[in-house]
Image (cartoon, grey):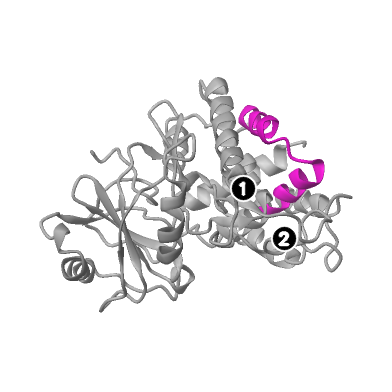
Amino acid sequence: MSGAGVSAATASGTTTGTARPRLHADEVDIDPDAVRRALDAQHPRFRDLPLTPLAGGGTINRVFRLGDELVVRVPLIEWGARDAEREARILPRLHGMLPVATPELVALGAPAPGIPWSWTVLDWLPGRSLSAAMRAAEESGATRDAVGADAADAGLGRLLGETLATLAAIEVDGDTPLETGGGDPVAERATLIDGLRAGAALIDVPAAVDRLERDLAHPLTPVVGVAGVAGVTGVSGTPGRARAWTHGDPLPGNLVVDGAGALTAIIDWSSAGAGDTTHDLVAAWWTVGPLGRRALREVLDPSEADWHLARLRAWRKAAAAVGYYAGSSPIFAADARRAIERLVADAD
């Protein structure tokens, strides 16, 4: 594949030899030479394939291109310490089950000198992330929500909705890991507001805080301690409702699109498992504009309570990211900024 491709978890899909910005104060420096040594020792069949760092790479993993057809994902922070083992369980179960592609697990690596946690080798998927597509549209003087694009936006929302519906219909059994989306946007009100204020360079903070406060005051907002929304339990006033297969993090960096903006793959399944489908509904504000949001909602047909809870979850993700990543991952901070703009403008 060419540099126009996207790896299973890179935002840009471009190779680079330059130093990458630190995303987290406590991240581990992943040396390409350490990755090379681990590959050669544990999977010698890849010995002759060149290893090249990729720009972007996501927020939890350092990502490397391996030859023309593979990608290596190495966790750089303890948050992702168990991601490789999770994906090794999840990806084989989902392969060929969805309307769009998912990464194929090629090899699982063990911790090694300079690599504290398990890591994966996955196949390289063609296309680019939706994050990269939206950034390119903005740099050309347009926005994803307005470019040529009403039909494309609706098509993206529809196919994404169909994919998430297909995923949720897969049988959950005793071998299905629990989804790790987590978090309680109601109990974390103060943290959300602090996060929005930290993004002052990118967003209209007063407008965002005002809309968040109105959403939190909405009659459909669960009451903390009565129908808490943390993790995968107690959702929308129905504690312990049935769990379904969810992706857990269907954000623009994890959606792969082709040159026309059509969805072709969903990547980074490290948060996936049996959980609360409102975690996946956050895509309605993070990935699509008004027509795409309407199409996604029509396909998934959530209850009013679930739709509102999904709004709150979208706020939680956006508030956490917009300031935190402003200096280290501008592409992810821009995704959060767009989500906030849509949440403020959306009347539903």
Q: Secondary structure at mark 2?
A: loop
Residue 334 is labelled as none
Residue at the image position 56 percent from the left and 56 percent from the top: 273
Above-or-below relation of 208 to 133: below
Q: Could you say which is closer to the camera, residue 344 or residue 305? A: 305
* Residue annotated with mark 2: 185
* Left or right placement of residue 241 versus residue 117 in this view: right
- Occupied quadrant, residue 294: top right
Residue neighbourhood size for the residue with mark 2, other residues' Cα within 10 Å, grouped as few (<14), some (14–19), many (≥20): many
* Left or right placement of residue 175 versus residue 61 in this view: right
What predominant SS class does the magenta segment belong to?
helix
Residue at the image position 21 percent from the left and 69 percent from the top: 42
Q: Is residue 322 visible?
A: no
Q: Secondary structure at mark 1?
A: helix
* Residue annotated with mark 1: 280
Image quarter hosting the C terminus = top right
Question: Which portion, as a residue range, is magenta?
Answer: 290-313
Amino acid type at circle 2 is Pro
User: Picture coordinates of residue 252 (x, y %)?
Assistant: 50, 44
Image quarter hosting the N terminus = top left
List the single residue furthest toward the left.
48
User: Picture coordinates of residue 331 (x, y %)?
Assistant: 45, 49
Q: Is residue 166 visible?
A: yes
Residue at the image position 79 percent from the left and 41 percent from the top: 303
Above-or-below relation of 131 to 224: above
Amino acid type at circle 1 is Asp
Between the residue at mark 2 and the residue at mark 1, the CA separation in whole angstroms equals 15 Å
* Left or right placement of residue 286 versus residue 243 in this view: left
Residue 303: in magenta span: yes
